[in-house]
Structures are given as C-alpha cells and as structure tokens.
Image: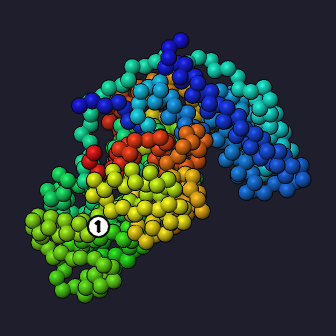
Amino acid sequence: MTHPLHILCVDDEEDIQEVVKLCLEMAGGFTIDTCTGGAEALAYLTHARPDLILLDVMMPGMDGPATFSAMKNRGMDIPVVFMTARVRGAEVSQYLDMGAAGVIPKPFDPVSLANEVQQLWSASLVKPPGPA
Amino acid sequence: MSTIGQAFDGALEGLRARYLAKLGEAAAEFDKLIAFCDLDALTPDIAAAAAGLAHRLVGSGQTLGFPDISRDAAVLETVLAADPPQPAVIAKAAKQLLAACRSYIQTGAPPVSSAPPPMAPVITEAVEPPPLAGPSLIAIHADPLMGRLLEDVFASHAHIVTYPSIADAVAPAYPAALLIVDLDSPGSQPGMLGDLRAKPGLAELPILALTAQRKSAAVARAIVGTQLEALLKPVTPIELDARANAALQRRRLSVVIGDDDRIVRELLKARFETQGYQIHLAHDGEDVMTLARAHLPSIIILDREMPKIEGVKVLGMLKADPATQHIPVIMLTSKGQAAEISEGRKAGAADYIVKPFAPDQVLARASQILGLPG
C-alpha cells in the first residue's frame, strides 16, 4: 500500500497555517492537518500518526520545544521540523541537538516549501531522530 | 503555465488579499503603540504584545509576498527587546513599519514572482498505521505484561492509547469508549482516581480498574465514589474482554443533528441510524445546547444558520462548557468562503462541510473523526 506524505502543521497563526497547507497540498500533493497549539497537537497525535510534523517554536501556552519534549516523553518518534522567525545559529543547533529533523526559518519561500519538506522527510528516514 | 501553477497562484492571491486586511488591523495597533511611546506611557504589557505581533509579522510578511513587512517588523522586534526600553527608538521603528503596512494597503500586493513547478505527488511505502478501527481505549499502566494482555484482547478491534500514570493521562481529542487503569503502580494509586475524573473529557468515561489488592480499603473507597468497576488480578483475557464489552455496550454511539431544515435533518437521521447511532434531532441552536448537555453525544452535526442561537455561537458555547467541549462538531454551511470556514475552525469545529452535500459524506467524516471503520 502506498500513500502521499501526511504532514501535521502546528502553528497558532492562521495565515502561516493556510499558506503551508496551500503550498504542501497544491505544490506537493501532500495531505495536511493543522493544529493551533501544542496541547491540541498532542491530543491529535493520540489518534493519528503523520509522517512529519512542522512545529512552530513560539506559541502561546505550550510552545514548540515543550511540545516536542512531551512527544518524546510519550515515546513518539515522528520526525519534527521546527519553523521559526528570527532564527539564530545557536537556536538551530539547540533544536537539532534535541533531535529535530530540521529547522525551516520564517519567512520561507512558498514556492520551494514542498521540496524542502520532502527533502527533510527523506533525510529523516536515513538518519533516525537524534538522542532522546 | 501549468494548471496547477495557475490554481496555486489564484489560491495564494486569495490569502494575500486577506493578509492585506490584517495589515490594516496591525497598522492600528502600531498607531496605538506610537501614541503610548509619545506619551511616555509604554508599559511592559503593551511592549510584549507589540513584540509578539512584530514577531508574527517577521515570519508571515515575506512568506506571503510582503518583504518590507518582515524587514521592518524585525527592526521593531529588536528595539522592543532592549532593556531598558527606549520609547523614542521604538516609536521610530513602529512608524517605519506602519509606513510599510500603509504603503502595501494603498498599492495592493506586489505581484507573485512565480508559481512553483508542479511536483509529482510523493508516493511512499506506507508505515504500518495504528489500528484505528473500532472504539478508542485509554490504558493507564506501566507494566509490560499488562500492555501485552491489552494488546492481545483489544488491538484487533480497538485503538489503544497508553499513558504510564494517571498524571500523564489527558483527555483525547475525540471521545474514548473505555478507560482501563492498573491501580498497582506508584503513578496510579486508588486515591488519584478523583484527579482522573476531574480531567475534562474523562469525567464520564466508564473505567475498569485492575488491581491485586483484594482487600484494600483504598480500592473499596475509590470504587464507591467514582462509578468504576474493579477487576481482581490475575485477570484472564476472556474475563477482560467480557467486562470491557459489557462496559462498551452501555455506551452506544449517539449524535445530535442540529438543522432548521427538516429535509436535512431527516436525510442525516436516516444515514446515521443505519450505523446504529442513537439520534437526537434539534431544530434550533437552543435545542442543540439542551440536547448536547442532556445526552453528551459522541458527535454533533451543526448547521451554521439557525434560529435562536446561530451555529458558530452554539459551537463557542459547546467549547466553553467542560461537559461538552470534548465532543467533536461538524459544521454545515451553505457559505463556502475561506473566512467563514476558518472562523468555524477557530471556534473549534472538527470539520466543515459545505452544502449541498451527500449525507454519506457527513457520515463518512463523522466515522473518520470518531475513529470508526467506514
């Protein structure tokens, strides 16, 4: 059985959610689900298993890194790609050290997002998520 | 240009037009920020709110084709982070960003550079999906042997969600049918059952508690207060299956269908009845609230335009009430505009179906949301 890539996008910002959904659905042919926060994402993940999660860093309530930690504590091994504005080098290595599959800086280029996500997903198959 | 490219451009254009309207709202906020700075009345709360807004604009501006917004918002975010804050500098950066917002609002969105090359849909080998057929079951235990027993008995027909302790357990996004808890581990003492019941979404769930503490007074007290059934270890698979099935049968699937159109109600009723749902029909918003609170249905189908209380408001009330907030809601609407749909999504709708629809489509979405087959 085969299926198109299934991506969960977690972002509190509606504009970003919709542009990500648009780019990945129309340009990439992926299936996208969206959540607006960490708690909602954790609840979603109790009944679904996407291939990859795009996780905003700065969100009200449970932020991206906290959500990622909670996922790991629950034994989930889905590749996670952080999306964040004003990203700095130290931040990127911090997320990669946590075991993230990648970091996509915001603003991003809608035209190449689908390609970028697909590459990060392919890479995550070869290299399993880092130290838990 | 390819058809996919044109469709993509058109859809992106729609998002950009809406984003322009949001820039108008953001401009009003920066106007206020400048006024606070000019009056030397900037408070940490106002600065933090402005920094949050600026941060979001950094990420979204250029993404949606407004590069000046990202650039000027980044400057504002930086100066807002300075300690101590310098109102004159902040006001200057805010004015720059405000000018960028206004310039885009006046001249409209700059043209999109190019459409993405159409990619072939990515086909991958399927990862073994979790068994989603049948009802969900929440298991709380930290015992590998217990895990194996539950797998043996339930994995073929139920979706098992496991938490190591009562403190870890959270309400599922969609109603679970049964909760099984092992009361013999440190993280799941009988005295904690009250905490479990206090969690939203878990209050009404039938609970099967497994314990080897045959004569424990704590277990006895816990059982009295929490409408729970206890099973004494060792438990055989046959015994566990029988007790779980009995508990599940007491909790049949039910649906509240809220629509002022009798034909829509009857169509949906007929479809849902074939799947064994218990049906509650409501013809206005007030009815929906009454029936939802009285029956705590598995799912609610809600028309957007209804007398007395309109759909989006009903949705808000359902989500604000701890008793009903876990119930997934499918909104029906004759308006298919993106803004309407995102408004409903924001208010917590699990899905949105645009009329005219096939009743089968509604049933299929409900089954999917509830994790049922078909």
Foreground: B79 or B356?
B356
Q: Residue at x 29, y 70 (%)?
A: B206
Q: Residue at x 49, y 20 (%)?
A: B4
Q: Residue at x 40, y 63 (%)?
A: B280
User: From this viewpoint, which residue is outermost toward the top?
Assistant: B1
What kind of colouring is applied to the model shown?
rainbow
State whether residue B32 is above or below residue B112. Answer: below
Asked whether residue A39 appears in the rendered view, the answer is no
Foreground: A132 or B90?
B90
Amino acid under label 1?
Arg
Foreground: B247 or B260?
B260
Question: In the image, residue B343 lies at what x, y percent?
Answer: 58, 47
User: From this viewpoint, which residue is outermost toward the front?
Assistant: B263
Question: In the image, residue A109 lies at what x, y percent?
Answer: 57, 26
Which quadrant of the figure contains the C terminus of chain B? top left
Question: In the image, residue B273 lies at what x, y percent?
Answer: 31, 56
Question: In which quadrant of the rendered view does residue A99 lie?
Answer: top left
Q: Which residue is mark 1?
A: B251
Asked whether residue B364 appears in the rendered view, the answer is yes
